[in-house]
Image (cartoon, rainbow, N blue to C red):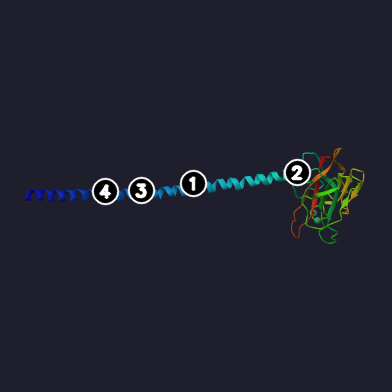
Amino acid sequence: MMKTAVLLQMSLLLFVAFTGSRADRARRYLDDNGGERQDQRGVRPDLQRGVRPDLQRGVRPDLQRGVRPDLQRGTRPDLRGERQDLRGEIQSPRVTDWGEWSDWDMCPSESFAVGMALKIESVQHEGDDTALNGIRLTCMKDQKLQGQVSGNVGQWGNWLEEKRCRASGTSTSYITGFTLRSEEALGEDEDDTAANNLEVYCDDGETLTGEGRDSGDWSASQQCPSGTAVCGLRTQVEDPQGPEEDETGLNNVDMRCCYLG
Ligand SMILES: [Ca+2]
Ligand SMILES: [Ca+2]
């Protein structure tokens, strides 16, 4: 009986010692393993956070912001300039060629130019002259005002009263051509003005002459093809050059011709 009790106690002690050491080893293993797992957790999020967001932020937004808006900005003015009834284009001869061209500024669908207003700087005497600074066309369809187009406009001068082609009864006369009065380049020490005045032709034979300045010469007349009328324009205007520089304002105008319905 005693022997059995002693054997049982020894077995119990051995079991406890054995399982205890197993538990220690298991704990150590888990600690080691847990350490490795923590390391793994320390790496993967870094990889995920360090690489994927960079790719997303570095590439996708650039593509979206860098390309798509440019394409949209590049095509929208052209789309505005496209009319299904577009036939051709008439241009002022490039007597001078200073400044940036505007986008095409087109009359709304199915409307045509019936009137024009000029922005003119009066004589500056001892100061720097620019003469013609802006051209604004009034667009109509069926004798209803549809809007105005002007392209770029220079900063000097004032808008003068609009001149319109005649309208009689239900028929409207449209602008079908123009001539631009331009002063050639005068040179380094002279006061250039470039474009000075505009004259437009109505399709009933009337001519509307602007109240611009009189330097330079009238160009040859620029006429839309038969059966068409002016439906938009773009202008070339020189940006301000600075206080002591020779400014010129508007230099050239091109007009587009569309088929009359
Ligand atoms: Ca000059
Ligand atoms: Ca000038």
- 71 sits to left or right of 14: right
Q: What residue is pinned by disc 1? A: 52
Distance from the alpha carbon under mark 2 to that under mark 1: 42 Å
> Which circle's residue, 4 or 1, is located before the other in the chain?
4
**Based on the displayed image, in which of its 4 quarters is residue 122 positioned?**
bottom right
> Which circle's residue, 3 or 4, is located before the other in the chain?
4
Secondary-structure class at tag 4:
helix
Residue 250 visible at all: yes
Q: Which numbered marker is on residue 37?
A: 3
Q: What residue is pinned by disc 4? A: 26
Q: Which numbered marker is on residue 153?
A: none
Label 2 Cα neighbours within 10 Å, binned few <14 / some 14-19 / many ≥20: many
Secondary-structure class at tag 3:
helix
Q: What residue is pinned by disc 2? A: 81
Ligand 1's quadrant is bottom right
Which amino acid type is shown beneath numbered disc 3? Arg
Query: Is 42 or 9 nearer to us in this picture?
Result: 9
